[in-house]
Amino acid sequence: MEQIDQLIAQVEQSLAQGNVLMAMAGLRRALTLAPGHVYAHCRLADILIHQDQLDEAQSLLETALRLDPKYAPGHIMRARLAMRRGASEDALESLNQAILHDHTAWGARVEKAQLLESLGRGREAALCWQQAASAMPPAIRESAQVKGMVDHARNVVVRNLAELREHLSERLKGLMQGESEAHLVRFRHALDIITGQREFVTAGPIFLPFPRLPAIPYFEREQFDWVPAIESRWREIRAELEAVMAHDEQGFTAYVQTRAGDSSAQFAPLDRNRAWSAYFLWKHGQRIDAHCRACPVTAEAIDAAPQPKIRGRAPAAFFSRLDPGVHIPPHNGATNARLTVHLPLIVPDKCAFRVGDETRQWEEGKLLIFDDTIRHEAWNGSDRQRVVMIFDIWNPFLSTLERELVASTVEGLMEYYGEDADFGEL
């Protein structure tokens, strides 16, 4: 077997040097020594196809696929042979066999897409190009050698999706006509995903996932009856913020404080850096009395919200301050059993917040309520500090019993693993 492997290596070296005759001689010798060597049959057949020696190539491929009917490269070679003979349907069938036996065979999908295009079957070709790009390893997809092909595939797919959107929009027009945008917002999002204009994003809790909850990036303020009570006091809350910023700068601590021995990963630039700082009223379920006394309106106002109460963990409530030019990198929260609430208090221009694929601007005095287990990030592109008040609320889709069970579970986890166990921001 070692001798065969050496022969095959010499064959590949000969081909790399352009010495086809020596490569063919090496493959014939390999087949003499090992008549059941499937790769040698297919490699020799490939060379013969390029030399228009189609009958011998066909015989070699028939032998190879008798030896191993699921050998995807053999089906690809047979497809090339069929195309050389102008038998397009046979070529498509062989490529389908290659894909059937090897779902990672991106090369077979590329050849199928090219063949479908040549046959004028553009829609099928677009789907195949889409599948080929998905199956292609990222290192290959991003390499200079295939850039032209990848760019062509992308153009075909984008053009097809635009035509698909036009087709579906026309077909659905009657059903959608006269309906309010509130009733159509979810479906329009689905249509955007189907036609390639948006990605499908969902929740990704890093520690305590609660199944069967809808993954909604942003919740609308009108859904919650407690919102007006907090928003009506936002100017008083901002006045308290400005007072503590003026007189209690030491009350602001770095928000990211990775424990010794743990990796801060994408948060390394912000670790123990007050460029992103917090002034806590509640932290890990503990009331910071001095801070609450300094901000009595704030402490009272957020009591209107259904905040989780979990011994040693919740509630958490704080002013979150972001310095000019700072970017909070994309990340996921710990559990979708709760939502996160922002009350924007100081928001210069060029500040933005993204959840999933949807970016929104903070508006001073208007709550922003979102599922932080959906990947999210924030920017302050201005030359001034940005400050929002942050607190958590229970996910409104949880029942009273489920909330109690989650709270008891988190407390049980701490009993089991220890009060200081790292569960993320539960």
Image (cartoon, grey):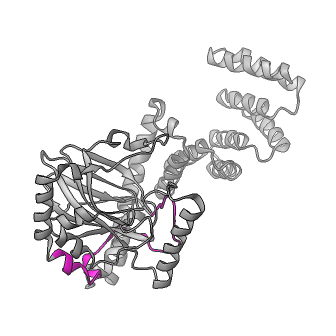
In the image, residue 333 lies at what x, y percent?
42, 59
When the figure is inspected, residue 342 is found, relative to residue 246, above or below; the finding is below
Q: Quick one: quadrant of the N terminus?
A: top right
Q: Quick one: quadrant of the C terminus?
A: bottom left
Is residue 204 one of those drawn in magenta? yes
From the viewer's side, name the closer residue of 5 and 74: 5
Q: Residue at x 45, y 69 (%)?
A: 311
Q: Residue at x 17, y 64 (%)?
A: 294
Q: Residue at x 37, y 46 (%)?
A: 257
In the image, residue 179 lies at what x, y percent?
28, 84
Magenta segment, which residues?
203-231
From the viewer's side, name the closer residue of 213 and 296: 296
In the image, residue 405 lies at what x, y percent?
52, 77
From the viewer's side, name the closer residue of 282 and 8: 282
When the figure is inspected, residue 282 is found, relative to residue 224, above or below; the finding is above
When the figure is inspected, residue 113 is found, relative to residue 179, above or below; the finding is above
Image-based side of 295 in relation to 194, left or right:
left
Report how many numbered discs are placed on residues in the image. 0
Image-based side of 319 in relation to 48, left or right:
left
Q: Main secondary structure of the magenta part?
A: loop
From the viewer's side, name the closer residue of 305 and 224: 305
Q: Residue at x 29, y 81 (%)?
A: 223
Is residue 202 one of those drawn in magenta? no
To which quarter of the image does residue 27 belong? top right
Image-based side of 17 in relation to 316, left or right:
right
To which quarter of the image does residue 23 belong? top right
In the image, residue 305 lies at what x, y percent?
30, 77
